Amino acid sequence: MFTTFLFLFLVAIFAGFFGALVGIGGGIIIVPALTLLFHLPIHTAIAASIVSVIATSIAGALSYVDQQITNVRLGMFLEISTTAGALIGAFIGVLMHGWTLSLIFGALIFYMAIVSFRTRETEDRLIESGGYSAIGGDKLSRTMMLEGSYHDEAVDKEIEYHATKTIEGSLVSSLAGVGSGLLGIGGGVIKVAAMNSMMHIPMKAAVGTSKFMIGVTAATSAVVYFLAGGIDVYIVAPVALGTMLGATMGSVVMNKLHSRVIKTVFFLIMIYLGYEMIANGLINGFNLRIPGLL
Amino acid sequence: MSNKGQESLKSETQFINRVVAIILATGMFSTVGFYLVGLILLFVKGRPIPSLANQYFHSFGEFFSYLIALHPRAFLYLGTVSLILTPVGRVFISIIAFWKEKDFKYVGVTLIVFLVIVASVIIGSVFKINVG
């Protein structure tokens, strides 16, 4: 029994650590790890993952709120969309067959592997040229005071910004919520993309605000899973503690490692996990066996 | 917006950030505490692990009797509940914080988020999970 707990704990540390290094939550690794290594039903894995997402988000949000990068108002506003999405996602997830979830998850992992491999160069240019403060907010953004500023340490400048395309950004954010409820992930990548590329929020403010929102979004899904009888506290405890610890360690060493190597390793792990999740879904759903990768 | 207006927006933001940080820290430390106590009790006492279907407590009375008996499950349960409730508490406190700052637009925004969470309580209570 002790070894199972220790193993769960270590896998969770790994997921949290790697997640923090490549800038995603651990959920995308936790769910396949729990189903493939520990042979847990995918609903139990998703429920455990969503609770551990809350744990990492609290630890992460704490450091970001302290740094005054988080835009609390913007976060609160977008939470309407993300929690509504989370509620719908969890509702569907609770009722859906496990094999369907495996297939969706496998597809998502492939997508995330590719997305996380891309680099961002336009961001630095926009920061340097003061392009963010030049973009004015739309009407809804002005009404809801969705503006802010933060001190960017890299260029030692105060970066001012105003949100634009607020309705489009809200709609995309609700998809992040659905992902959280349906698959047990934080959905940070989707939220950051909505805020950064669509609403013109600087990357750092978008990441900080996204971390702030993930907790409430995940809690909405977690409430559904908890009350619907899906949360195994014996699994959740070591997994939540592990991801929290791993994510904290990851954020400490993040700047000292070469991101190219990390991204390549991460990419390979994701491709493997995505393939296995799809294989898992095909066996359970259609009794169809595809050859193993390893 | 006048300079004065921007100043007050800034101090308001800092106040809310402060309150939020306190809630998150309290929630995180209590969760870690409950989980550690629960896991240590589990290893010391060596209680068997029930299946998921038999893990839930059916009443507060049952929960308290397990808690007083220092049963590991009660503490693991408590850690999970405090973890889930931390962001919910953050939303609730934010309603009060925005209210005190007389920012009624955001009292409304935060209330809507809170209502969605209330809806999730209802959905979770009505539908049961389809494991498999």
Image (cartoon, coloured by chain):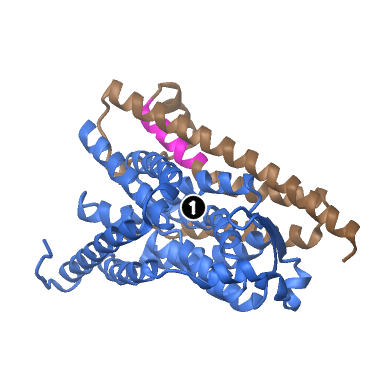
Chain colours: A blue, B brown
Image coordinates for residue A38, horizontal then vertical, percent: 21, 49
Q: How many numbered marks, from 0 up?
A: 1
- Which quadrant of the figure has residue A157? bottom right
- Left or right, A171 with reference to A161: left
Instruction: Say which residue appears at 58% left-offset and 49% top-offset.
Output: A64
Residue B84, placed above or below residue A121: above
Along the viewing direction, whichever of A291 and A96 lies nearer the viewer: A291
Q: Residue at 36% of width from left, 54% of height from top?
A: A258
* CA neighbours of label 1 inside 10 A, class few (<14), some (14 to 19), many (20+): many
Residue A6 vs residue B87, the one in the foreground: A6
Decide whether residue B73 is among the magenta residues: yes
Residue visible at 46% across and 53% down in the picture: A222
Q: Is residue B40 shown in magenta?
A: no
The x, y position of residue A71, in whole percent, is 66, 58
> Magenta: predominant secondary structure element?
helix
Please indicate, yes or no, whether residue A259 appears anywhere in the rendered image: yes
* Vertical arrangement, residue A218 with respect to residue A165, above or below: above
- Drawn side of residue A54 relative to residue A261, left or right: right
Give residue A277's position: percent from left, percent from top.
Answer: 23, 64
Q: Amino acid at mark 1?
A: Val
Tell me, yes or no, if residue B131 can be seen here.
no
Quarter of the N terminus of chain A within the rendering: top left
Between residues A73 and A284, which one lies in front from this camera angle?
A73
Q: Is residue A180 left or right of residue A171?
A: left
Label 1 resides on the chain identified as A
Q: Residue at x 57, y 44 (%)?
A: A62
Region rendered in magenta: B71-82
Instruction: Give percent across and percent down for residue B116.
Output: 59, 61
> Relative to A107, is A24 above or below?
above
Quickly name the residue at label 1. Answer: A223
Quick one: SS at disc 1? helix
> Which quadrant would the C terminus of chain A be assigned to in this image?
bottom left
